[in-house]
Image (spheres, rainbow, N blue to C red):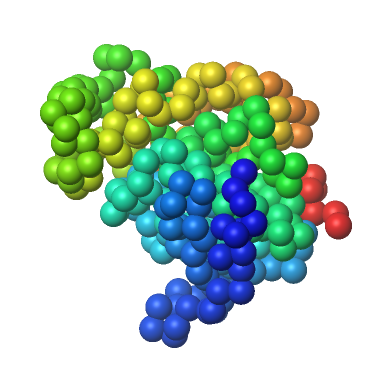
Amino acid sequence: MIGRRAILSGIGCAALPLSRALSQAATAGGQVMAASGYRVEFDEYPASGPLALVLMHGKNSFNRVANIRAFAEKIAAAGTTVVVPNMPWGRTWNGTADDAKAAVDALVARAAAAGKRVVVGGLSLGATFAMVWRPADPPPAVVAKAFLNPGGLLDMTPPTAPFWRRVTPEVERAKALEAAGQGRVAVRFTGSNAVGTSFVEETYTTTPEIYLSFHDTARFPSVRAALPMTRLPVFWSSGTRDPTASAKRRSFDMLAGHPASVFLEPEGDHNSAFVPAADPLAAWLKANFARG
């Protein structure tokens, strides 16, 4: 958990200027300082209900892409405040997995300090990070998790998968650079990401330390270990044409098995199945957690 000073730094932040406003629904934003020293910026879609959803975007993305905005507006309109941070694996690649964990800690503490019960979730890598974030020791304010089209389930991806053919040489190069004392010097790396119904190659400019924290199974938290430790209720949605095979029903079945947990397969691919999951998620939140 983070200290009170870090929590308060994100409370009472001014609304975004009109030039940066996304929509009428996103009326507040700011930043919090995580315990690691990482500053996480966020937009907030406020609602009057007792819940707040911390919603993390996907890999090499950011918190203001159209589908994130549309999803957040739907959830907020149904009564749940949505907090959408810019995570370290966004387009700037400016923090490690430890920074990401500390950032979620800070955002959860901020919502709890405002009297909200909290759901932690995300899209793609944001969903996967929600899986590995405090699976066995969630703060008392956290009542559920939401995994939407999870991607990047690192230690559950078969070693023969195309992902590893692209990424393994880069992991070894990053380790060599780190061993040579260049672990915090930014260079260009290749990665892989799910887009639509296929996987694409991407490039990221970041440090070996940051790259390894999200691509080395020895450093990124184990999804395989996290799932059976997860005793909170989980909303899990994976599109029918999502190519991330490791994120399907058999992975959901590895959860501890809370009676309120649900698994859905809306029509769509890794991207298009995301927004259609908003209405079922809003209904699930209302049915299980929205009573004051």
Between residue 249 and residue 221, name the one nearer to us: 221
Q: In the image, residue 241 lies at what x, y percent? A: 41, 35
Question: Is residue 147 visible in the rendered structure shown here?
Answer: yes
**Split into 4 quadrants, where in the image is the N terminus?**
top right
Instruction: Determine the residue positioned at 32% across, 25% down.
Output: 216
| Image quadrant where residue 181 sits | top left
In percent of the image, x 37 and y 41: which residue is there?
96
Q: Is residue 226 left or right of residue 175?
A: right
Residue 277 visible at all = no
In the rendered structure, the answer to whether residue 146 lies left or right of residue 274 reads right
Percent position of residue 166, x then y: 19, 27
Question: Residue 199, how many percent across, how many down?
Answer: 27, 35
Q: How many marks?
A: 0
Q: Residue at x 74, y 27 (%)?
A: 258
Q: Percent x, y for residue 284?
A: 72, 46
Q: Which residue occupies the foreground of this view, 253 or 7?
A: 7
- In which quadrant is the C terminus drawn? bottom right
Identity of the residue drawn at 27% across and 14% down:
160
Residue that sits furthest to the right in the current view: 292
Q: Residue furthest bottom?
A: 18
Question: Is 248 rendered above or below residue 125?
Answer: above
Instruction: In this rendered view, identify the residue nearer to me: 25 or 129.
Output: 129
Q: Is residue 215 left or right of residue 79?
A: left
The vertical placement of 170 against 83, above or below, is: above
